[in-house]
Amino acid sequence: MDLTIRTSTDADFDAEEWLHGVARGFLLAPRMSDAEVADRLARPDPGRLRGAFAEGRYVATYRSFDQRLTVPGGTDVPAHAVTGVSVHPGHRRRGLLTRMMTADLAEAKDGGEMLSTLIAAEDGIYGRFGYGPANASASYTVEGAEAALPSNWTLPEADGTVEFFVDGSLVRSAGPELFERFRLLQPGAVDRPAHWWGVVTGKIASNPAWQEPFYVVHRDPEGTLQGMAAFTTDQRWDRGVPDGTATVHWFVAATTTAERALWRSLLSVDWVRRVKADRLAPDTLLPELLPHPRAARVTAVNDFLWIRPLDVPAMLRSRGYAVEGELVLEVADPLGFAAGRFLLTAGPDGAECGPTAREADLTLDAAALGTLYLGDRPASRLLALGRLAEGTPGAARRADLLLSTPRRAWTPDIF
Ligand SMILES: CC(C)(COP(=O)(O)OP(=O)(O)OC[C@H]1O[C@@H](n2cnc3c(N)ncnc32)[C@H](O)[C@@H]1OP(=O)(O)O)[C@@H](O)C(=O)NCCC(=O)NCCS
């Protein structure tokens, strides 16, 4: 069957039916609930939707939208984010994703986008389209939380205050501004759409399984909000002894004092013997801020944000560099968007990047450049893996020094 790809600019595009297609594609439900459809259709700027339409329904879905991505050096850049990718059973492995993605990336390139981002459900899907894993996220379990901190621990006055059980309305009113301060300090963070705060506080009833969490906030000694987190507990007791597990659903800290204060406070809740959290920074302060770091166990570390270069000079000019350096990169790209040889001249005061005829220091493909961009994976590691080649001895080590960041790139949000 020859399937036509429809896009949201076509007159016969049905956005509601497309949403049901997403629900089926992600095996969530045969149809999306009326409440969720209404909420999603009301959101501003849905971006560009695509889908393969057959017999009155979408059997494949795809969406891209404008995003801001914080890059090393403390600026955010425009990103072409991809999400909602699904191809229904019965239509898989016939090239539908390939058709939707290559058309969308070509439009993004024509529109002057410098890079594309996504979060991959599986690690085998997107490398062929020029995306490389650019950072990681970690899951932690802190066992015996009570044993990890002294039982009489309280937050020192100089570190500000922590308040438990604040109302969801405070989270909605103060959270967005706090998150904006945090995200511009954190390479890898992406902007959070306004509806995120309504969804996680139950104001927008999109998830029937949603349970109201407890919210906790940190304020500095001047009273400014510097951190916020949400957790639920399972209320478990074992033969009269508390054995509760607290699950931290999200965590924002705009200062390291807030980061330490919130974790220590979460680990000092009576009846909670264990704290679990997913999607943490790969270099979270969590283990070492405990008197006994071994109380915190890493339960998983996985790739998280994937980056696909589209305009290499624009990308490399946009990020910051802590040291002076020069690199000639030869980028191969079967789709053509990022191919070329480029000279990067960078330093703490800014960077220049453009085409060059000089000999290449490093030869790599677009996906490998996506992996290097946020500085989370050293070029030396990609060299060891055979994912890039050195034209000049020592060039990978030079790239390591040029691209590295003090704290690792982290993307707290799924999109
Ligand atoms: C992943 C998915 C979108 C792929 O769609 P598709 O239309 O089958 O992909 P294509 O037919 O265009 O495949 C292109 C290539 O990728 C490969 N590929 C597709 N899905 C793959 C996967 N999950 N793992 C490894 N390779 C995959 C195909 O084998 C094909 O390779 P080839 O060109 O060498 O033959 C589809 O399987 C799906 O909807 N899965 C469930 C939902 C999901 O995971 N969505 C992604 C959310 S991030």
Image (tube, rainbow, N blue to C red):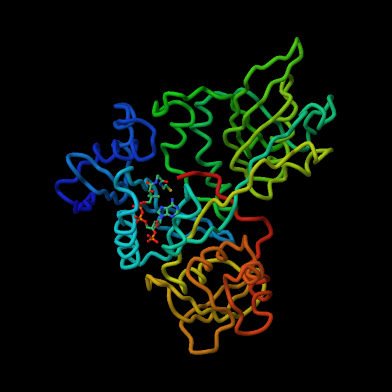
Which quarter shows the C terminus? top left
Q: Position of residue 113 (x, y in %)?
A: 38, 64
Q: Nearer the viewer, residue 376 or 285?
A: 376
Q: How many marks?
A: 0
- Say if 231 sits above or below 237 in the image: below
In the rendered image, the residue lying farthest to the left is 11
Residue at 45% x, 56% y: name it.
117
Q: Position of residue 352 (x, y in %)?
A: 52, 77
- Say if 384 sits above or below 360 in the image: above
Q: Position of residue 312 (x, y in %)?
A: 46, 72
Q: Nearer the viewer, residue 322 or 1?
A: 1
Q: Nearer the viewer, residue 79 or 297?
A: 297
Q: Nearer the viewer, residue 97 or 341?
A: 97
Give the side of residue 411 with respect to residue 145, left or right: left
In terms of image quadrants, where is residue 129?
bottom left
Give the side of residue 228 with respect to residue 271, left or right: left
Residue at 73% x, 34% y: name it.
142
Give the side of residue 78 with respect to residue 350, left or right: left
Residue at 75% x, 31% y: name it.
143
Q: Position of residue 393 (x, y in %)?
A: 67, 83
In terms of image quadrants, where is residue 380?
bottom right
Residue at 50% x, 53% y: name it.
123
